[in-house]
Amino acid sequence: MHVRVRGVYSTAITKILLDNGISISHTSKKIRERFSLPENREPPTVTIKDTDQKHGIVIVGEYEHGKRVYEVIRDSIKDCFCWVSKLPLHSIIKGRVVEVKEGKSIVDLGEHKGVINCELETGSEILVDVARPFLPHEDLARLSRNYTIYGKYVALIRGLERKVIFSKHLMNKKLKQDLLAMTTISNIEGWCIKWRSSAAIGDFNQMLKDLQQTFEKAEDIIKRGENANVGEIIYDGEFFAIICFGRNAKNFLDEVRNEVLPTIKNHHILKSMNESEVVDVSEHMLSMGVGSRDKISESAMSYITSLMKEQKSISIEHVSVLSGEVKKLTPGKLVEVEGNFYRMKRIFKSKGILDGLNVQKMPGDYDVMEFSTDLPVVLHKYYGKDNDFKGVYVNLNTPPEISRNYIRYIDMEVDVIASDKEVKVIDKELLEKAYNLGIISENTRDYYLSLAESLKEFLLDFEDLSRLTLKELSEVVEM
């Protein structure tokens, strides 16, 4: 097993893997220097990289190896959230078409079902490729007949018109020309050849051998598929998982990285939120002995807060724990900061319904939003444009992370709403679903369910909801 690690979490993740006896390959120069590692040119069997939003990592690779790496990281980092594909990515499965409508076919895969974007004959048996990760909250796998078979340096794809494609990480023009020449002498027919990023470190004889062996494997897989039973996985494909890190997990990763080289607190939060320059300057000062870790870390966050105050608008990233979807809420203006408590004002521009409260929202209505980077709740107090109070919405989430331009948290789905008419907990079943799907732990589920009930009891006894503050709610959270 060889793992390639890239992105803002690379140093901390590399240390965790090395401490668990897992080999690292295709490393950057910085990582080799930090861990005194020799250059390892073995092609990686697993790749770890940032998610698009950098709120976590993606693990993808040879199935058993990927699963092992995932388990090590999951068990090492507490308070993380995990979405594992229910079927291996690009696994090839025998299925039966059970329904056809509107240009799509529903395919029975045994334990699961999938959808393919073409109309096939009902009752027919076909081989399908799991074309996209099949995440826990999804009901149907997205399928294709463009089968993908992986080698160490190459992937073969059935059904594409192009003969050769290259990984976006292969930049060297001379290398691409040589790989094209190798493709010409291979005499492979019926498959598109994709050269993987590992080709950048491959030996030409090894890569030519890998190409031929992958072709033989691919032909054998398709042949075996002809006589397979419905639901049978003919080719394992790749393990795929997303691990999302909330504030507590990132704080843990800060401490792991600090064992390797000087690291400020909130390093991974700020790096993942595009505040690299602030981090780099602060850690340069730390390495020069200019100040203590606590003082420099505090100074960095104070500077970020000062930049937030200057912004006309602060964006809000609301990440669903159930689906991983990043929802952009109506942005707001930071109007007050007192210690670690932040107050924003969000003015709505369109009509709608205030979620949970089921109260009409009109242009000019506004939300007084309060949060603290230490608390797992966000308080919303809604008002009409004429300052008439409409109700309270307490969002339960991971403690918010901040940058100069936006805040981010992972929404735990369950919430508490309060108005003159009622106080209640809503969407408990969604939090329960996240637990049943293996996204969150039992402890996390129980904590947020208990917190929701405590907040409800507190709000039931609160006399004037329009005067409620986050500081008062914090007494319940800290119990």
Image (cartoon, rainbow, N blue to C red):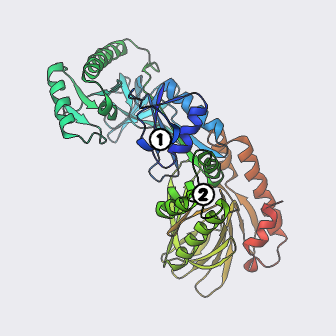
Q: Look at the picture and state if 283 lies above or below 103.
A: below
**Looking at numbered disc 2 in the image, what kind of residue is underneath it?**
Ile
Residue 332 percent location from the top left of the image:
54, 75
Graded by Cα atoms within 10 Å as few (under 14), some (14 to 19) or many (20 or more), the crowding at tag 1 reads: few
In the image, 470: left or right of 359? right
Residue 264: image x %, image y %? 60, 57
On the question of residue 136 being in view, the answer is no
Q: Mark 1: which amino acid?
A: Glu
| Left or right: 208, with 92 as reference point | left
**Does any portion of residue 97 appear in the rendered image?**
yes
Q: Which residue is mark 1?
A: 33
- Residue 367: percent from the left, percent from the top? 60, 76
Callout 2 environment at 10 Å: few (<14), some (14 to 19), or many (20+)? many
- Say which residue appears at 79% left-offset and 57% top-offset: 453
Question: Which disc, if any, is residue 264?
Answer: 2
Q: Residue 337 or 108: which is nearer the viewer?
A: 337
Looking at the rendered image, the disc whose residue lies closer to the viewer, 1 or 2, is 1
Q: Quadrant of residue 182?
A: top left
Asked if residue 204 is positioned above or below residue 175 in the image, the reply reads above
Helix, strand or loop status at disc 2: loop
